[in-house]
Image (spheres, grey):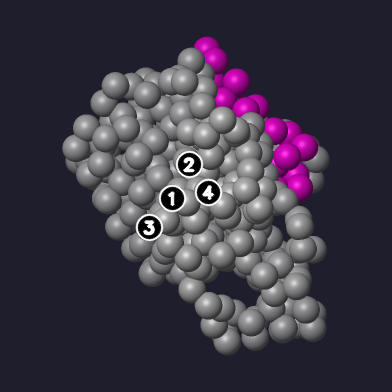
């Protein structure tokens, strides 16, 4: 059994608090695997902890769109059944990853805000707290083009994601985001696009991505990396897929795992707050392997 999680690729050094939170989320997510829980249940709990922390661009810490509204995207996928669910632009609820799971078990695969909100209400998901002054003030500064802040935000993606393999050898992947800085209302990135932000197939591998969604979508990065794991180890597969991102001038990072338990944590950016646990140790770092 193995669980991997990330808190976003980027050019800014992750804080100690963020790394600590990833460690905490990994421990909690792994305890689900130990309790005979599925890979899917494990990644959802891991991601929900990161969403609730307010430390990442997901859940209560999510970016605002230019009109001052948080519209959250998330997706989950199971490798055994090739089942997937996603929500796009969910407003008013703090755990889009849970909404994505609900969509997966509904007759549909993707719901935008209007439908995702109805299901979130029906399933009693927790509402998003009111926006605080600090977040609103940050958007104001970004809009005013405060150079330093805009540069930081352009280079820093802090979407969260996780992949896991459970005791039955089943794989799962999930991802949750508030998008990127200074996005137009209605902008959608890679995260809720099955095959771009996440993909899981027991026959190949499970992948969750982070980075500039506009680039990741063009390469269908998660599916690209997953397909490359057919007959190949995660490390060369992830490297090949990320080189494709670099070839279009993009930036991204990904976590990938195969049924054998082999895995890769790779990024084209200087950092990617991430880590893994196999129950014996929990390893969390500012970054793992950088691809140039
Ligand atoms: N991939 C996300 C998006 O484009 C951003 C991120 O990874 O932080 O919406």
Whether residue 218 appears in magenta in the rendering, the answer is yes
Q: Earlier in the sequence, mark 3 or mark 1?
A: 3
The segment highlighted magenta reads 213-235
State which mark lies toward you, 2 or 1: 1
Rendered location of residue 119, percent (x, y) = 52, 48
For image coordinates 52% across by 34% down, the residue present is 106
Q: Which of marks 2 and 1 is nearer the N terminus?
A: 2
- Asked if the residue at tag 1 contacts the one at tag 2, i.e. Cβ–Cβ closer than 8 Å, the answer is yes
Considering only vertical position in the picture, is 108 above or below 19? above
Quarter of the picture holding the C terminus: top right
The residue under label 1 is: 123
Gap between marks 4 and 1, in whole Å?
Answer: 6 Å
For image coordinates 30% across by 57% down, the residue present is 24
State which mark lies toward you, 4 or 2: 4
Q: Mark 1: which secondary structure?
A: loop
The residue under label 4 is: 119
- Mark 2 neighbour density, 10 Å: few (under 14) some (14–19) many (20 or more): many
- Mark 4 neighbour density, 10 Å: few (under 14) some (14–19) many (20 or more): some
Rendered location of residue 64, percent (x, y) = 66, 69
- Asked if the residue at tag 2 contacts the one at tag 4, i.e. Cβ–Cβ closer than 8 Å, the answer is yes
Q: Earlier in the sequence, mark 4 or mark 2?
A: 2
Gap between marks 2 and 1, in whole Å?
Answer: 8 Å
Label number found at residue 102: 2
Q: Earlier in the sequence, mark 4 or mark 3?
A: 3
Quarter of the picture holding the N terminus: top left
Considering only vertical position in the picture, is 232 above or below 68? above
């Amino acid at each position: 059994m193995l669980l991997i999680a990330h808190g976003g690729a980027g050019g800014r050094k992750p804080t100690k608090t963020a790394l600590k939170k990833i460690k905490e989320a990994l421990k909690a997510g792994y305890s689900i695997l130990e309790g005979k829980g599925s890979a899917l249940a494990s990644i959802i709990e891991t991601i929900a902890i990161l969403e609730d922390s307010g430390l990442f661009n997901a859940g209560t810490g999510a970016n605002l769109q230019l009109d001052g509204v948080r519209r959250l995207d998330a997706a989950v996928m199971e490798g055994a059944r090739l089942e997937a669910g996603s929500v796009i632009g969910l407003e008013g609820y703090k755990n889009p990853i849970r909404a994505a799971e609900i969509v997966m078990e509904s007759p549909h695969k993707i719901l935008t805000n209007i439908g995702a909100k109805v299901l979130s209400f029906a399933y009693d998901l927790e509402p998003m707290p009111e926006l605080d002054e600090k977040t609103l003030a940050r958007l104001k500064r970004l809009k005013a083009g405060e150079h330093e802040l805009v540069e930081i935000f352009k280079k820093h993606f802090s979407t969260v994601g996780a992949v896991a393999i459970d005791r039955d050898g089943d794989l799962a992947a999930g991802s949750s985001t508030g998008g990127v800085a200074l996005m137009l209302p209605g902008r959608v990135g890679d995260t809720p696009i099955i095959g771009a932000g996440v993909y899981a197939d027991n026959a190949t591998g499970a992948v969750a991505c982070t980075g500039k969604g506009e680039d990741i979508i063009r390469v269908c990065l998660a599916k690209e990396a997953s397909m490359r794991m057919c007959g190949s180890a995660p490390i060369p597969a992830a490297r090949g897929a990320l080189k494709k991102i670099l070839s279009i001038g993009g930036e991204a990072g990904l976590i990938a795992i195969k049924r054998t338990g082999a895995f890769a944590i790779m990024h084209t950016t200087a950092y990617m707050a991430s880590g893994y646990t196999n129950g014996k140790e929990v390893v969390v770092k500012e970054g793992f392997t950088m691809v140039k």
